[in-house]
Amino acid sequence: MLNGKIFIKTFGCQMNEYDSNRIYDSVSKLGFIKTTNQSNADCYILNTCHIRDKAKEKVYHEIGRVKKLYRDKKKPIMVVAGCVAQAENEEMVKREPYIDIILGPQSYHKVNELLKNHIANLKQEETEFDTISKFGYFDQIKNNDNKISAFLTIQEGCDKFCHFCVVPYTRGPEYSRPFNTIISEAEQLIENGAKEITLLGQNVNAYSYKENFKEFRISNLIKHLDQFSELERIRYTTSHPRDMTDDLIDCYSYSNKLMPFVHLPIQSGSNKMLELMNRKHTVDDYLKVYERLKKINAEIEFSSDFIIGYPGETQKDFEDTLELIKKIKFINSFSFIFSPRPGTKAAKLEMIEKNIAKERLTLIQEELFNNQIEINKSLENITINVLVENKMEKQNKLFGRNKYISPVIFDGNENLIGKVVKVKVQTSNQNTLFGLLDKKMEAA
Ligand code: SAM
Ligand code: SF4
Ligand code: F3S
């Protein structure tokens, strides 16, 4: 049975996507084969996210769906992985006996052992914080991801403890992987065909690895990746305003591969709210980073994350956030109503009225979406560089992204996948640009 099919359904951030791929790499050593058919698997993994809303309830709902899918079939080995698994651990098995294995994000190096033990008939729960052996284990296993745009986790966990956030509890303390192991994994990804690498971390720019009295920062990684001739583009996410150090900002002055797009969450445009959230930076700190980056390269654009309706947010605080959005003109952003997370400081605070929070979210999103529409519109009739990622499944078209990570859809031959081509934008909507391939490029 160890050579069965395995299906992973992934929720949450890019780090979960990276983890799911590494789990596939690990279980393939046992003989498991990845399947994209969720109703025909011998092992079904839910890789969960705990950041907002009714995360736990969503997992039980998903398991209910899997139960239905397999009603007339052999039950798959049911694994709950990810941040909900870490937060809820054994509670979940008690409530839902259909679950066979609970696997926290710091225990993925134990997945093969747990599957083997399960087949030998033991219920399993593994949610210890053991990040070092996790990465130590995965360093021994080749990364088989063969996407044109690949993720590479360099840092995990968080020591900042923003009062609203569950990440320090689900991902544990900050840990930075050794410099050399990241570089050799990048080499594997490039060998597999990657043309773009996105360095990942919950606080990716807090990356700090010390060896022989020398500190390696994310700027050192970028500098090194910059030299790989087969690599076209470098990105990183998610960065924290406090860790935008001079050496990182300076990378934009010499790296041609570092894309001029910074995802830099601020959460609120009000200093009072930032303090209540325990963000440890002010609006002014943020604006200084913005200005320094713009000075180095005026082409750099920003996106951000916003939490609306955090306890204590007044109309004035909200207007300050709107003001900031008008000033910076973020080219895309994530905005959500505050969602109290169990175990965090903010969970005990008095919530502001739901209707007010909803109204504010609508206004914020109107502003953010209008920016997005405007920026996409301004690219119409302009020829842009696009890294072609794949052929679209349902349409006979190519899919790629511009330097600002916006999706671009256009007609073209499959042999352009993996190349940077020129596309003249014809039309656009809020999220996507539609264009025509530059004919000279097609001939190339
Ligand atoms: N480390 C990054 C930073 O501090 O900028 C953010 C990482 S967090 C996984 C992604 C985003 O989720 C945050 O920027 C925040 O906007 C949002 N988020 C986290 N906790 C939340 C909560 N309780 N309610 C609503 N949004 C939340
Ligand atoms: Fe969460 Fe704050 Fe850490 Fe970001 S910095 S992961 S928002 S605690
Ligand atoms: Fe979600 Fe965990 Fe990522 S809570 S956002 S999957 S770090």
Image: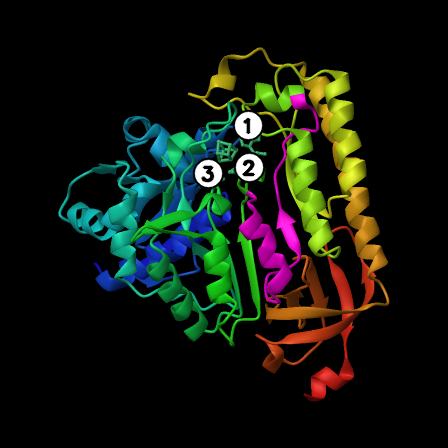
Question: Which disc, if any, is residue 280?
Answer: 1
Between the C-alphas of marks 2 and 1, the distance is 8 Å
Q: For the residue carrying disc 2, how many other residues have a C-alpha within 10 Å: few (<14), some (14-19), or many (20+)?
A: some
The reply to whether dot 3 and dot 1 touch (C-beta < 8 Å) is no
Q: Is residue 196 above or below residue 111?
A: below
Q: Which residues are magenta?
A: 244-271
Amino acid type indicated by mark 3:
Cys
Q: Camera-side residue: 100 or 244?
A: 244
Left or right placement of residue 162 versus residue 353 in this view: left
**Residue 310 visible in rendering:** yes
Residue annotated with mark 2: 242
Could you say where residue 371 lies in the image, as x and y percent from the top left? 80, 45
Q: Quadrant of the N terminus?
A: bottom left
Between the C-alphas of marks 2 and 3, the distance is 25 Å
Residue at point 75% right, 85% down?
440
Query: Which element carries disc 2, helix, strand or loop?
Result: helix
Kindly indicate the quadrant of the structure image that contains residue 330. top right
Residue annotated with mark 3: 49
- Considering only order in the chain, which callout, 3 or 2, is on the residue closer to the N terminus? 3
